[in-house]
Image: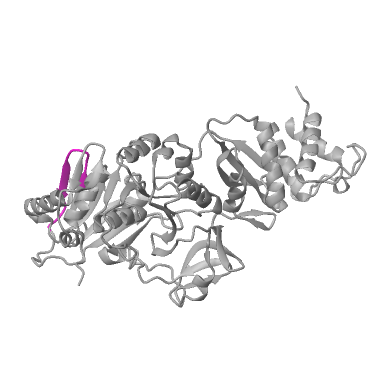
């Protein structure tokens, strides 16, 4: 039977000196990870069976410690580094009975004991992983996973040839998937410093010959604008976290002809739901038709997933309907044999009773050559309730008169969108913010 | 500097264009009936929104619900009163 923790899994493969974790200033091979795990566990015996809260400022060290701790402590709770401990999270944290707080800094480890773990000298076989997330609704939640639920979709075929770049925070589900995929397959993971900017990240990847990358469509769009993207030869391109439209899929395919291109539909609550490999946007309608775990209700996708996190930490169950399905909040439209994601239910703008999904309008605006990215929002309006407004970021190194571009955008939207969906106002902005996972930040 | 009337006229015509509508009267006059001018409710909403951006004024937010201007002249008056 497959061992249910990281270290034992790693030990079951051949241990050598190939580097599997690389950061800007440090790196680790499977051999060093094995040796350091043994050292760590004998030095920190008091962490055995502990319920630990982990606050990390350094993803490289966090990756190493996840290997040391999984299978050794009873619980590990990860706080996203991008989150300051604000009130909502404090509440969540205070209700948990932590034994230790582990602070992973760049050059040291600080362990604070709050109370002793229960005396149970049997080695834990399945550590609970608790991920703090804003989930689908924006409300902070804690989701309980374990090695099995986290690795459900991770292929552990020992394919040593891939060198992954980490674009997501390691404290988030997506980042953990990439980490687990690479470490369990004997592959290499290149981890940028959290304070490095976009260009520095890309350069680190290029230096280390990254040929596999999992990132959001927004990240990929930015990546393609960067001239360093010329230097990569990808074997594996994965997209997730946002809707992957045909345009980004085509752009990636035409630039990296030899690469697989997968787009994954997943959520923190439910884990990975399906993975589409045909380089077409959306997914085959038959996936829903043939699955007893997927259904569409009023265009919203509902999922029943076996790999879902077992419960919210504060005891409330995931909001399941009577048959055990979870409303994803993702809206889908059927076009023939294909189902396409059109946007989030909660972002819907109501223009005089007509519903507009921001992502749909963004996709249209983004089709224009001069546009790098757009953000569509509802603006309160005393006549119709809301109007559609677009913030547009023009591509760098492109010369165009703003008025002319506005006209182009309006004309293009007239061709593609019903009237109430067309932006009533267009503003040009310097930057459209994305979050730590590369998703566009919406208010 | 443009006065309010000129601003409103400019934005009115832009709103028509943006909603693909034509001005159905030879010119905008004080007694032009708004509902017959060619501007539909979406165009009207856009007009109010763009005027709010430009004039920093949205009299419709504060108005009692039953008061809607019927003519172009009444519309202008609402804004010039609010601007004071």
Q: Position of residue A198 (x, y in %)?
A: 39, 37
Which quadrant: the N terminus of chain A? bottom left
Q: In which quarter of the image is residue A143?
A: bottom left
Residue A384 visible to the viewer? no
Q: Residue at x 12, y 65 (%)?
A: A123
Q: Is residue A3 magenta?
A: no
Residues rendered magenta in the picture = A103-116
Who is closer to the viewer here, A186 or A420? A186
Residue A149 in the image, given as x and y percentages of width and height:
31, 66
Image location (x, y in percent) of residue A312: 35, 64
One can see residue B30 in this view: yes
Q: Which residue lies furthest to the front in this view?
A: A258
Where is A132 relative to A24, above or below? below
Work out which residue is located at the far top of the displayed protein and give it. Answer: B1
A79 versus A293 height, above or below: above
**Of the pair A58 and B53, the residue shown nearer to us:** A58
Q: Residue A117 appears in which quarter of the rendering?
A: bottom left
């Amino acid at each position: 039977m497959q061992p249910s923790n990281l270290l034992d899994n790693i030990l079951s493969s051949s241990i050598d000196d190939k580097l599997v974790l690389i950061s800007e200033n440090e790196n680790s091979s499977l051999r060093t990870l094995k040796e350091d795990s043994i050292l760590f566990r004998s030095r920190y015996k008091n962490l055995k069976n502990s319920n630990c809260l982990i606050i990390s400022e350094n993803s490289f060290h966090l990756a190493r410690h996840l290997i040391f701790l999984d299978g050794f402590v009873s619980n590990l709770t990860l706080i996203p580094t991008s989150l300051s401990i604000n009130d909502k999270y404090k509440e969540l944290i205070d209700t948990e009975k932590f034994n230790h707080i582990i602070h992973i800094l760049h050059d040291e480890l600080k362990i604070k004991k709050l109370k002793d773990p229960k005396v149970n000298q049997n080695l834990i076989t399945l550590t609970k992983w608790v991920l703090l997330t804003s989930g689908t609704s924006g409300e902070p939640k804690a989701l309980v996973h374990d090695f099995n639920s986290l690795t459900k979709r991770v292929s552990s075929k020992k394919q040593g040839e891939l060198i992954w770049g980490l674009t997501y925070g390691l404290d988030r589900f997506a980042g953990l998937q990439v980490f687990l995929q690479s470490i369990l397959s004997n592959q290499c993971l290149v981890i940028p410093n959290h304070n490095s900017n976009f260009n520095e990240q890309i350069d680190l990847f290029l230096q280390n010959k990254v040929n596999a990358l999992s990132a959001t469509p927004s990240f990929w769009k930015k990546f393609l604008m960067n001239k360093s993207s010329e230097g990569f030869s990808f074997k594996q391109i994965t997209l997730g976290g946002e809707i992957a439209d045909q345009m980004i899929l085509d752009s990636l395919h035409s630039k990296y002809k030899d690469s697989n291109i997968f787009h994954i539909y997943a959520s923190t609550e439910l884990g990975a739901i399906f993975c589409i490999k045909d380089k077409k946007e959306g997914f085959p309608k038959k996936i829903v038709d043939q699955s007893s775990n997927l259904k569409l209700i009023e265009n919203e996708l509902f999922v029943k997933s076996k790999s879902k996190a077992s419960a919210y930490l504060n005891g409330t169950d995931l909001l399941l309907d009577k048959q055990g399905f979870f409303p994803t909040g993702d809206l889908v439209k059927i076009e023939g044999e294909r189902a396409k994601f059109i946007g989030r239910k909660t972002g819907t703008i109501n223009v005089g009773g007509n519903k507009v999904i921001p992502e749909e309008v963004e996709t249209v605006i983004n089709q224009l050559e001069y546009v790098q990215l757009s953000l569509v929002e509802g603006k309160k309006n005393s006549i119709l309730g809301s109007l559609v407004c677009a913030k547009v970021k023009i591509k760098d190194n492109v010369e165009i008169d703003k008025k002319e571009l506005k006209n182009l955008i309006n004309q293009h939207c007239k061709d593609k969108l019903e009237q109430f969906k067309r932006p009533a106002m267009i503003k040009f902005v310097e930057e459209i913010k994305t979050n730590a996972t590369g998703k566009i930040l919406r208010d | 500097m443009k006065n309010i009337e000129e601003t409103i006229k400019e934005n009115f015509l832009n709103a028509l264009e943006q909603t693909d509508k034509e001005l159905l009267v030879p010119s905008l006059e004080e007694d032009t009936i708004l509902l017959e001018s060619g501007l539909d409710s979406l165009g009207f909403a856009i007009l109010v929104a763009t005027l709010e951006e430009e004039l920093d004024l949205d009299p419709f937010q504060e108005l009692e619900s039953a008061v809607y201007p019927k003519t172009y002249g009444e519309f202008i008056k609402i804004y010039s009163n609010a601007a004071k």
